[in-house]
Each structure stands twice: as structure tokens, then as C-alpha cells.
Amino acid sequence: MARPMTHAHTALVLIDLQRWIVDRPWQPMGGAAVADACGRLREHFAAADSALVVLVRHVQADGADGGLAAAANRPVPGFAVRADEYAVVKHGLDAFEGTGLHERLRRAAIMEVVLAGLATAYGVEATAATAVRLGYEVTVVSDASASESDAQHHEALDRLVALGVRVRTVDSLVGS
């Protein structure tokens, strides 16, 4: 049985909340609704002094998308990195691949990661699967993530549950 979540050893990892990604059509909820849900999670975890908040952004390694400064690659409003947060820039689906995220989490004594963002069947799933392989307890927030279709979203969640990932809602984590 999994231990109860304690913020002292938990990191909230918010994936790909940047303009060009959030603005795409997502299901079962739109990108703006996902960003709002992620904002609720962020505020909750930020209020817990011992929790770590990680904001992940995707840019192409070759700079063909204009890099971090390109308007489309900027975070949606409200998701600039704060002084007490950790920023990760990734070049593929997985926030752990080549980013130093695992090392940063280990230094902070993180044992559990809570994942949300876009897209469930891409960045969220790839990052969650790696986190499981690395030995973290993993939670994906189902109503703070979305995919290209409702079916794709739920299939990704089912695959993650089969790996041992917990699926929770925003309200179950932050309260109503």
C-alpha cells in the first residue's frame, strides 16, 4: 500500500504549459482549463513550504522553433518561473531525459512526483513512466491534463495505472 502524500517529499511537475501547446485542441478539456487546474495545483503546492514546484517547457534542440524566447514557446500567462521553483527545458517528451531533473529531485529528497499538464499521452505519460522506473511514487492528475482525444487521454491513464501510477483529481489533492 502506498504511503500518504506528504509535501515534504513531493514535487509538483507541470508539463508544457506554453502558448503553442495550450492553444491546441485538447480533450476531455481544453488547454485553458488544464492551465487553470494546474494553477490551482501550483498554488496549493507553493503554499506548502516544503514542496517543490517544477515547471517544464519543451523546445526543439536545434532551435528551429525559435527557442525559449519565441512567443509561441513562452509560458501561458501566470506560469513564469518563480524564484522558489525549478525550471526544466526538455527537447523530447520525457522531462527526465537529459535535463538533470532526477538529480535535482534526489538532492531535494523527493520521493513522490505529482504530474499534470499537456499532453497526457505524450509528455505526461513519458515523464510518469520514467519516474516509476527511477523509483518515485507517481501521481497523475486526471483533470489537470488532457490529450488529443478523450479516448487517448483515458487510454494513457489506464497504461499508467498498469505501471503503478496513482490517478487523482485536483479536488482530491487540494480540497474543494
Image (spheres, helix red, strand yellow):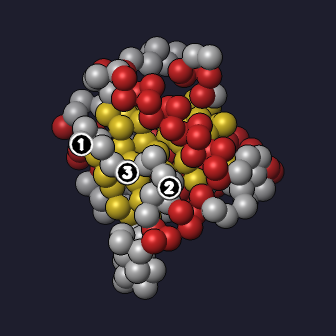
Report the disc number at residue 83.
1
Q: Disc 2 marks which residue? A: 76
Q: Disc 3 on helix, strand or loop?
A: loop
Q: Is residue 169 left or right of residue 91?
A: right
Q: Disc 3 marks which residue? A: 80
Residue shown at 36%/70% (left/top)? 68
Nearest to the observer: residue 133 or residue 16 = 16
Nearest to the observer: residue 99 or residue 53 = 53
CA distance separating discs 1 and 3: 10 Å
The reply to whether residue 148 is in sight is: yes
Residue shown at 31%/63% (left/top)? 98
Disc 3 residue type (three-letter): Ala
Q: Quadrant of the C terminus?
A: top right
Q: Is residue 84 left or right of residue 95?
A: left
CA distance separating discs 2 and 1: 17 Å
Q: Where's residue 93, x and y in %?
A: 49, 62
Q: Where's residue 9, x and y in %?
A: 32, 25
Disc 2 residue type (three-letter): Val
Extreme residue in the left direction: 107
